[in-house]
Amino acid sequence: MTQPTGDEVSRRRGGVFRRRTVGTSIPAEGTTRRTRYVDDGHLVRAPRDTTVDGAQAFTDEDQHRTALLLYPRPTAEDIAELASAWDLHPLLVEDLLHAGQRPKLERYGETLFLVVRSAWYIDAKEDVDFAEFHILVRPQAVAVLCQDGRWIDGLDADDASGAADRGDRTLLDDEQLLHHGPEAIVYRLLDAVVDGYTPVLRGLAIDREQIERQVFSGDATVTERIYRLSQEVIDLQQATSGLAEVLAALRKGFRRFDIPEALQSYLQDVADHLSRAETQVSELRESLSQILTVNATLVAQRQNEDMKKISGWAAILFAPTLIGAIYGMNFDNMPELHWAFGYPLAVGGMVAFALVLYIIFKRQKWM
């Protein structure tokens, strides 16, 4: 991440402080936040009107407790409430307010900030769509912000069975794992994101096979499809490579932050799956590049064949044109001008020349 200048930091902090609320954390009207409590590995539903401060008070009572704050559609008021309760760094708040970031990992004091992107394949449009998640990890607390209003699988995160239910199933359905604290929730989220890349790669691989058949069948519209699919693969490669950097940074902090060995093993498994996905993405991109080259070669070859045919017919038509041009000059003193066999001979010469050239070009496979 590029380090901002002093003036830029002051300007950004000023903008952040103007967005922050003052005093205690009061939930904004209409907030989409869903709060879940984990008590010694057991999922506990928090009261609906629970504030961020209330969740923190719950975790402060026992070191074996964890709070999950899930924001299906985070608003500026939600982020201001969270920033006030957790005393977030102004630059971190600025990042939370602006989506469209590459996967990354940053640490601000005791708060770990992660940006990850999930992906899903839309078969009807042959398209890959993405959802961006901002994750804040603190001792005994995790906040997950769905910046695009979508869950990992691409469904609306705020519908009746949206982020709350799917989040419970995805992040909180393993009580044994939840004993390891907030890092276990982060692991489950990363694991779900990486697993989501598999059907995307499967869909892209099918598209590639279809494109290969189009290329060799001579379909003239295939070039645009290759370019569109290449763009989807590039976007997926950016998501996977960025997440690989995030996982590498997490693994470097295992010993420093005393991550349980069980979680280290789980995270290593996620890294292995992601490595395979990265390899498949790279192979897809390389194969599409090769397909594009083959398609360009075939197009050039077809154009060359067309040019041969055009040149051959031009040569065939040139011979009778030359004879017709000579005998069409209307000179008074031409030997064959008043000859009775002049016209049949000229026409015969035209046909003979054209036939001879046609036979020659046909043998040379120009026709």
Image (cartoon, helix red, strand yellow):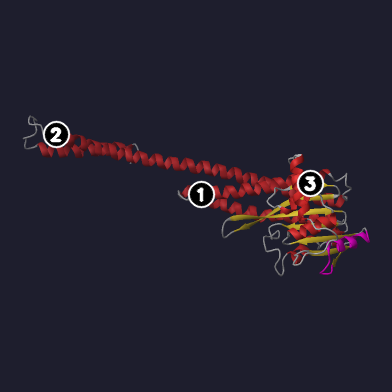
Residue to which mark 3 is pinned: 106
| Number of residues whose C-alpha sits closer than 10 Å to that of mark 2, classed few (under 14), some (14–19) or many (20 or more) | few
| Residue 103 sits above or below residue 58 on the image | above
| Number of residues whose C-alpha sits closer than 10 Å to that of mark 3, classed few (under 14), some (14–19) or many (20 or more) | some
The first of marks 3 and 1 along the sequence is 3
Q: Is residue 127 left or right of residue 29?
A: left
- The amino acid marked with disc number 2 is Met
- In whole angstroms, how far apart are the C-alphas of marks 2 and 3? 88 Å
Residue to which mark 2 is pinned: 329
Secondary structure found at label 2: loop
| Residue 334 sits above or below residue 276 on the image | above
Q: Position of residue 225 (x, y in %)?
A: 52, 50
Q: Is residue 55 magenta?
A: yes
> Which dot marks residue 99?
none
Secondary structure found at label 1: helix
| Residue 46 sits above or below residue 336 on the image | below
| Number of residues whose C-alpha sits closer than 10 Å to that of mark 1, classed few (under 14), some (14–19) or many (20 or more) | few
- In whole angstroms, how far apart are the C-alphas of marks 3 and 1? 39 Å
Res 279 visible: yes
The first of marks 2 and 3 along the sequence is 3
> Which dot marks residue 224?
1
Between label 2 and label 3, give the one nearer the viewer. 3
The quadrant of the image that shows the C terminus is top left
- The amino acid marked with disc number 3 is Glu
Q: Position of residue 182 (x, y in %)?
A: 84, 56
- In whole angstroms, how far apart are the C-alphas of marks 1 and 2? 53 Å
Magenta segment range?
Answer: 46-62
Q: Is residue 110 magenta?
A: no
